[in-house]
Image: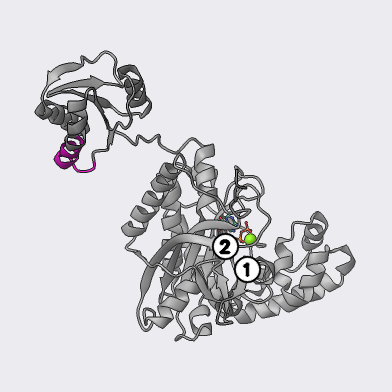
Amino acid sequence: MAKTIQAIRGMNDILPDQSPAWQFVEGVLRQVAASYTYQEIRMPVLESTDLFKRSIGEVTDIVEKEMYTFDDRNGDSLTLRPEGTASCVRAGNEHGLLYNQTQRLWYMGPMFRHERPQKGRYRQFHQFGIEAFGMEGPDIDAEVILLSARLWQQFGISDQVELQLNSLASNEARARYRDALREFLRAHEDQLDEDSKRRLDTNVLRVLDSKSPETQQVLENAPKLSEYWDDESRAHFDGLCQRLDAAGIKYVLNERLVRGLDYYNRTVFEWVTTELGAQGTVCAGGRYDGLVEQLGGKATPAVGFAMGIERLVLLLASQDKIPATQTVDVYVIALNEAAELKAPAVAEQLRNEQQGLRVQLHSGSQNMKKKLAKADKSGAEYAVIIRDDDFEIKHLRDRDQVDRSAATIADVITLVANKEA
Ligand code: ATP
Ligand code: MG
């Protein structure tokens, strides 16, 4: 036998027994996004490498070590998108969607990062993202967070996720804080982990979410970002908190929440669960008021989030919140040659009669018992058994219900239609 070829490590097939869960999740995401009047945007999975370097930042985990970057046949450097916001802003600028107007957008699709694969962390994964452009007040931050909260509510997992909130304030305030933090950490440099030492010069804010206990110990006495907030950012943040309070949304303030992408300012937030081990962040986002301009557009305030769909599906499965699905409603069996010739037409008639009815036609010649066993295994509600011109309807799920023999196609349709209605 020929050697089999395997999928790329960290890139998963979503198999037929998993796709109903994905369809369920995607359906809820679409429906909730629509209920806040967000419109879908679809971007290509490949972009110019510069797009991500300029937006996410050169000194971030993503750009430093996680991107799938290659030269195409023309010698242009391309990158498989590691996230959606940069592409969304690029598309918005390119098509004039952001110029002097507001936009409420959502996207969903695969993202690519060369990370160490583990539970909840893959090299191809999927994100659902929300981006709101052209609105600077805290009301829109609140809207975006309320939208995410509604998702948890719809999925029945509100008790499994916690909202963490922080403000990165203005660029100027953050720059002052960066200096103060760097100065403080320099005095304790010998106690820092290697990554944090390196980040002192390049991206000192990222030291705040170091996983090292020693570094976290040092940070206990470090200056706090909130001590450096500018008045406007403080008022914006207070405005957001008041709106969340009024809407009954609980949150915790996490002073060390800084996010790994350079483009954020003011509001940042994460929805975190304890049910998924180390990969506990299901959804993360914030404000990025400078990005549109940074990518060549007119200065436009913006706020959004991205949700990891794999992590969401894992969380839902762990809480038994994925509804059971049935893929077949009616299973059609022919018992003799005359019936076999007619069976496809009967199946068509059933499909004509009721839109969306899922009709599986038995294929292959087996004995009656095997055919019925297959019908049963399909999960169908009914088996329709054809012999010459006669129909028999068998109710497969309810043994007590009387089966009908010598029925007509009209009977079959009526019975199935009533049941489905
Ligand atoms: P983490 O800290 O877990 O690496 P991140 O800060 O890199 O996450 P973001 O870039 O903010 O993540 O992406 C938003 C969401 O996308 C994450 O909260 C997570 O749910 C999901 N996500 C990010 N990277 C991966 C991945 N490699 N595999 C699966 N999901 C991911
Ligand atoms: Mg990451």
Residue 248 visible in the displayed image: no
- Going by the image, does 230 lie left or right of 408? right
Q: Is mark 2 within 8 Å of ligand 1?
A: no
Q: Say which mark, if any, is on residue 67.
A: 1
Residue 353 lies in the magenta stretch: yes
Residue 143 locus on image (x, y percent): 41, 62
Q: Which one is in front, 376 or 398?
A: 376
Q: Say if the magenta span includes residue 98.
A: no
- Residue 305 horizontal/vertical position (percent): 49, 63
Residue at 61% across / 62% down in the picture? Answer: 113
Disc 1 within 8 angstroms of ligand 2 (CB): no
Q: Quadrant of ligand 1?
A: bottom right
Q: Closer to the camera, 367 or 44?
A: 367
Label 1 SS = loop
Q: Which residues are magenta?
A: 347-356
Residue located beneath label 2 in the image: 112
Q: Secondary structure at mark 2?
A: strand
Rendered image: mark on residue 122: none
Q: Up-down: is 389 above or below 144?
A: above
